[in-house]
Amino acid sequence: MTNLSLAQRFQEARAPKIEVDGREIYGLYEIDISSGDTVLSLDFVSSKKSSIQGVKIKASNCNIKVNNQILTDFVMWVDRSPKHIPMSIAMKKGAKATLKVWNVWKCDDVSRAWIGNAGMLVKKNDRQIAFHCSDGMGDPDFEGLVFTIEIGKVAK
């Protein structure tokens, strides 16, 4: 790796994904959920105690029901959330529905994202997506926060 931070590399690429040392690193990962009403679950697998970390989710053309609340833009903090978080999606008619997902962390009680060496390694298989996240502090460490999102159709 050169001395450029991941944030500098994302800026130069003007893209949500870059390649570093043969690995694809995401600043933001977009999930297409246009195929119909969907259920999701977010599971926190592990986190390091160096900073309070979380997951930012922003919905486009859909609403997310989580903990009996209808949301479109929210953060799930690892220190304030259960390890397993079920969610359901209500689609808006006629538009492509997506979820944008990225890692966030707190430093001096301020939420941060997309700076320094922040980024995510993403591993997708079948219905589950695993996110290995580096906060922006220090050298990249993709085990700072690990979480999964599982996607499934509503049984009708």
Image: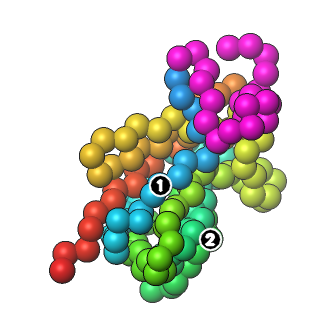
Amino acid type, mark 1: Ile
Residue 31, numbered circle: 1
Would you name the residue on which mark 2 appears?
73
Percent across and percent down for residue 140 are 65, 28
Residue 141: quarter of image? top right
Percent across and percent down for residue 127 are 29, 52
Q: Judge from the rendering whether residue 78 lies leftward or rightward of residue 50; answer left or right.
A: left
Percent across and percent down for residue 145 are 53, 43
Residue 72: quarter of image? bottom right
Q: Judge from the rendering whether residue 6 lies leftward or rightward of residue 102; answer left or right.
A: right
Q: Quadrant of the C terminus?
A: bottom left
Q: Is residue 30 a member of the stretch shown in magenta?
A: no
What residue is at 51 percent from the left and 35 percent from the top?
Answer: 121
Camera sees residue 115: yes
Disc 2 versus disc 1: nearer the observer? 1
Query: Crowding near pointer 2: few (<14 within 10 Å), some, many (20+)?
Result: some
